[in-house]
Image (cartoon, rainbow, N blue to C red):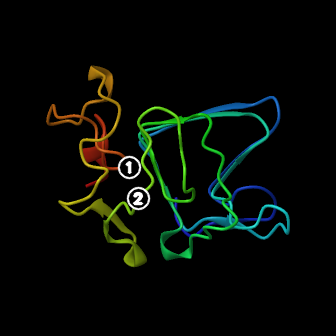
């Protein structure tokens, strides 16, 4: 999901109260909101959202003073919208996409998201290696080609 803007909440994903969403091996890039109070959110949730093996980034538009992402239900994800993301396995770094401005979200060979996803067997990449974070990782990552 890239370059989406919502009227309310997150431009990439917004989960309403009483709802549950699981995001696995997703890439969200430069999403935001036109809402004055939640501007720049890629993800917002009044309900429950679990994020695993995902990459969430606003690229160079990251506002380090007013972090807009709550990572309390994310694990083994690279979330560039925060400066500190404590839950298990999370990274705060540049994902090093090949060409995000032209919607190529495959990872460069030196990406910190390669082999950094959840180590469980059910999440392994199709080649049997540890899960790469983002849409091209996990058992179905090759399905996008």
Identify residue for label 2.
Answer: 93
Please state which of residues 103 and 118 is positioned toward the viewer in this rendering. 118
State the mark number for residue 102.
none
Residue at the top extreme? 121
Q: Is residue 31 left or right of residue 106?
A: right
Percent of width and height locating residue 94 = 39, 63
The residue drawn where x is 29% and y is 44% is: 132
Q: Is residue 25 left or right of residue 17?
A: left
The residue drawn where x is 44% and y is 42% is: 90
The residue drawn where x is 81% and y is 29% is: 18
Q: Is residue 56 left or right of residue 104?
A: right
Percent of width and height locating residue 40 = 69, 66
Of mark 2 and mark 1, the one earlier in the sequence is 2
Mark 1 neighbour density, 10 Å: few (under 14) some (14–19) many (20 or more): many
State the mark number for residue 135.
1
Q: Quadrant of residue 125?
A: top left
Quadrant including the C terminus: bottom left
Q: Secondary structure at mark 2?
A: loop
Please state which of residues 35 and 80 is positioned toward the viewer in this rendering. 80
Percent of width and height locating residue 19 = 75, 31
Please state which of residues 83 and 76 is positioned toward the viewer in this rendering. 83
Q: Quadrant of residue 76?
A: top left
Q: Secondary structure at mark 1?
A: loop
Quick check: marks 2 and 1 in contact, CB under 8 Å?
no
Q: CA distance from mark 2 to mark 1?
A: 17 Å
Percent of width and height locating residue 26 = 45, 47
Q: Where is 1 relative to 128, above or below? A: below
């Amino acid at each position: 999901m890239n370059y989406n803007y919502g009227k309310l909440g997150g431009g990439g994903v917004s989960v309403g109260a009483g709802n549950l969403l699981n995001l696995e091996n997703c890439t969200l890039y430069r999403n935001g909101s036109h809402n004055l109070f939640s501007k720049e959110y890629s993800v917002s949730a009044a309900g429950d959202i679990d994020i695993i093996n995902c990459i969430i980034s606003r690229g160079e538009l990251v506002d380090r003073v007013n972090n807009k992402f709550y990572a309390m239900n994310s694990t083994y994800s690279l979330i560039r919208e925060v400066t500190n993301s404590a839950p298990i396995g999370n990274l705060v770094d540049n994902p090093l996409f090949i060409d995000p401005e032209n919607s190529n979200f495959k990872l460069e060979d030196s990406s910190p998201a390669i082999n950094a996803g959840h180590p469980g067997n059910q999440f392994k990449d199709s080649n049997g290696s540890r899960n790469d974070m983002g849409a091209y990782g996990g058992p179905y990552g090759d399905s996008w080609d």
